Image (spheres, helix red, strand yellow):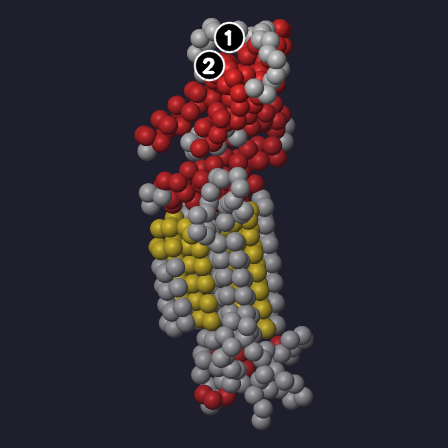
Amino acid sequence: MSKCEWRSDLDQDYRCRVAAGEGSKFCIFHEPGEKDIERFKQAFYSQIGEEGPTDERNAQYEFTGYVFPTGLAVHSGKAELILPREISGALIVAESTIEGDANFEGATVKGRADFRDATFKGGANFEGATFKAYASFGHATFKGGASFWGATFKGNADFGEATIEGGAVFGGATFKRTVFFVDATIEGDGTFEGAEASFIYLGDGRPTILWWERNREGVTLKNWSTGSSFWAFARRTFAKGDERERADAAYYFEKLWQRRSRLASPGRERLMAIAGYPFEILFLRLPIAYGTSLVRPLMSWFVLIVLFGGLYAGFPSLIGRTVKSVWTLSNWVISMHFSVTTFTTLGLGDIRPGRLLGKALTSIEAVVGGVLMALTVVVISRKLMR
C-alpha cells in the first residue's frame, strides 16, 4: 500500500508514514477538501492513543500539515477533536489547517509547541495555557482572532510574521524569556495590558524613530487601541531591561497611537485633538519626537537657521542691506550670522531687519528658536535623568 505523498515546506525530509487513501495520493490527515469527520476522528484517536503499528502512523502528537475538518481542543465540544489537557511531550501542529475553533484554554505543553505556518480558520483560545518549552506561532494565520490572556511562556515565544486578522488578546500573559514579534501583523482590536516579558525582539535596530528607516516599528498594527497597548507593553519591557534607546522608540510610537486614538474618538475629545494637532506636529512630534530624540532638535536647529539664512541672503533688503550680488560669499556668511543670532535670540545689533516683512520673519524665527532651545533642554534633561 502506497504512503501519503504530502510534503512539508518547512522540512524537506519530512515523510508521512500513514497509508494513502483509496484513489488518492494523500492520507486522511493530509487530504484536502471535504472529509468524513467520523473516519478522521477514528484515525486521529488511533494515532494519539498509540494504537496500530508504529510504521503506519505518525508520532503521537505530531500533526504536521494536517487538515482538521473540525475544531481542536482540550475541552469537550460538539464535533471537536479532543487532546489531553496536559501534553508531556512535544505538540507539533505546523503547516496545519484547523477548520473549526482551536481551544487550548488551560492546557499545558511540556515539550516544544510548534504552530508554524498553521491556519486557524475559527477562533484560537490559548487563555491560561502554559508552554514550558519553546513555542512557535511564526507565519501562522489567525482568521478568527487569538487570545493568550494569562498564558505563560517559560521558553522563547515566536510570533514572527504571524497574522492575526481578528482580535489579539495578550493581556496578563507572561513571557519568561524572549518574545519575537518580528514583522507580525495584528489587524483587529487587542490588548497587552498587564503582559510581562523579559525581552521583546522586533528585528535588528528596531524599533527606531529615524525617518529614513523602512518598517521602523518592526511590527504592523492596524488598530489604534492595539497600537497604544502594544507599545506601552514594549516600553515597559525595554525599560525593565535597561534598553534605553528602544524604550524611547517604544514611547514615541505609543504617543503616536494615542494621538490616533484621540483623533478617532467621538465628540469633544476629537475636536480638541484636531485643534491641538498642528502644535503637536510642529513642536513635539517633528522637532523632538516627544522628547525621545536629541538628533531631531539639532537637525531642526540646522534646517531653520539655514532656511531663514537663505531668505536673508536671497533678499538682502529683508535685513536692510544693499549688495551688488546675492551670490557673494560675504553676503551668505553675514546672512547666516544674522540668522544664528536671531534664532538664538542673542541679537548682537550689528545687523537689523529691514522692511515690514523682514521684521515679521525675524520675529517668527526668534520665537521658534526660543521654543526649540527650551525643548532641547527638556530632551537633554530627560536623558540625563535616565
Label 2 SS: helix
Direction from residue 372 to residue 196 in the image, left or right: left
Q: Residue furthest bottom?
A: 1
Badge 1 amino acid? Ile
Rounded to the nearest angstrom, the CA distance separating label 1 from label 2 is: 10 Å
Above or below, 94 against 258 in this view is: below
Residue 205 horizontal/vertical position (percent)? 44, 48
Q: Are marks 1 and 2 in contact (CB under 8 Å)?
A: yes
Nearer mark to the viewer, of 1 and 2: 1
Above or below, 160 against 274 in this view is: below
- In the picture of the structure, the residue carrying the numbered disc 2 is 341
Direction from residue 33 to residue 112 in the image, left or right: left
- Determine the image quadrant of residue 70: bottom right
- Determine the image quadrant of residue 27: bottom right
Above or below, 145 against 336 in this view is: below
Residue 159 horizontal/vertical position (percent)? 48, 57
- In the picture of the structure, the residue carrying the numbered disc 1 is 351
* Crowding near the residue tagged with mark 1, few <14, some 14–19, many ≥20 C-alpha atoms within 10 Å: some
Dot label at residue 332: none
Badge 2 amino acid? Thr
Q: How many numbered discs?
A: 2
Q: Is residue 258 visible?
A: yes
